[in-house]
Image (spheres, helix red, strand yellow):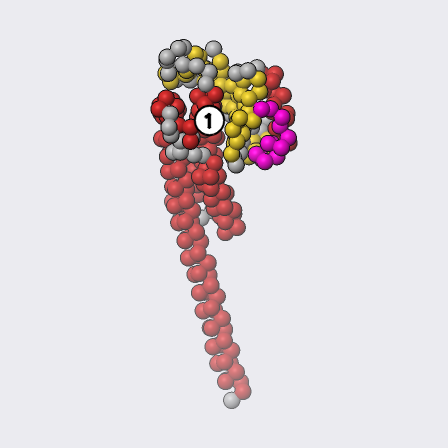
Amino acid sequence: MYATVAYQVANTINIKESKSHLSWSLIFHGSDELFYKVSNNSFIYIFQYGIVSFFNLDEDTINSVFNKIKPFCTNYFIDKLSDVVEVSVSNNTLKVGFNSVILPSLDEEMIRLVMLNTSQSVALDRYSEITEALLIETNKHTTYLENKGKLDISGYTLKRFIGRVLNIKNRISENLYIFDSPDSTWENEQLNKLNLELKQTFDLTDRYRLIHDRIEIIKENLDLFKDIMYHKESSKLEWIIIILIVIEVVDMFIAKIFFN
């Protein structure tokens, strides 16, 4: 029995710096991921979006890896979200269950798929927490708007809130390739079957859509807040113009009375 464990260790990990400083045997790499072989049947998978996944490594080794990659992390987390999948081997068997996978052999590509999908599951847990917190914060403003008929947020704070939501939306779109399949699955039916079953078991697609829907709801609310604030500022400007015109008319009227 082997364990695949994925951790959310940071907001982001610098892949370029990690690649240049880490000395394990690099099996696969891309612009946003590094797949290393540490020893016989032991692997590490590092992702730009702050996830590190381990296969068949003990806790002491995992902690030492954390220390090695910490310098390349942005906003390193002390409390880490994680997920575990047990992997066992049985000849001519490929089966994906809840938090367990049976592989026909310890094939590197199969192990990489298990680690990839486990990592994406942890990333979705993280983004689910973030978007839920954003939705709760947005609902506080909509409730205040319902009860008081006005917003309880300043223009500056609203702009920062909008920026935070857009940045999170961009990170999700850039970093999570839930709907993409690795190149290795295109021509290998067994790898493709494993990948699809892992996505289905982890419920990756539906969880991703839920997060995306939350972001869209938040964005719609913020657009409404922005329109209300714009209308409020426009009304202020209109009243300022009216007052200035009135003052100018009164001034002209006084001037005519006293100087004619």
| Residue at 50%, 46% in the rendered image | 163
Q: Position of residue 170 (x, y in %)?
A: 47, 42
Q: Nearer the viewer, residue 208 or 187?
A: 187
Q: Is residue 40 left or right of residue 100?
A: right
37 lies above or below 171: above
Q: Nearer the viewer, residue 228 or 104?
A: 104
119 lies above or below 260: above
Q: Is residue 145 within the magenta segment? A: no
Q: Nearer the viewer, residue 180 or 152?
A: 180
| Residue at 43%, 51% in the rendered image | 226
The answer to whether residue 178 of the structure is visible from this angle is no
- Give, as a single range, the part of the protein colored magenta: 14-25
| Residue at 50%, 51% in the rendered image | 155
232 lies above or below 16: below
The answer to whether residue 138 of the structure is visible from this angle is yes
188 lies above or below 179: above
Instruction: Name the amino acid, label 1.
Output: Leu
Q: Which residue is mark 1?
A: 116
For disc 1, the neighbor class at 10 Å (few under 14, some 14 to 19, many from 20) is: many
Numbered marks: total: 1
- Quadrant in which residue 181 is drawn: top left
- Quadrant in which residue 146 is drawn: top left
| Residue at 44%, 43% in the rendered image | 141
Find numbered disc 1 in the image and state the secondary structure of the residue it sits on. helix
Q: Position of residue 254 (x, y in %)?
A: 51, 80
Outermost residue to the front: 187
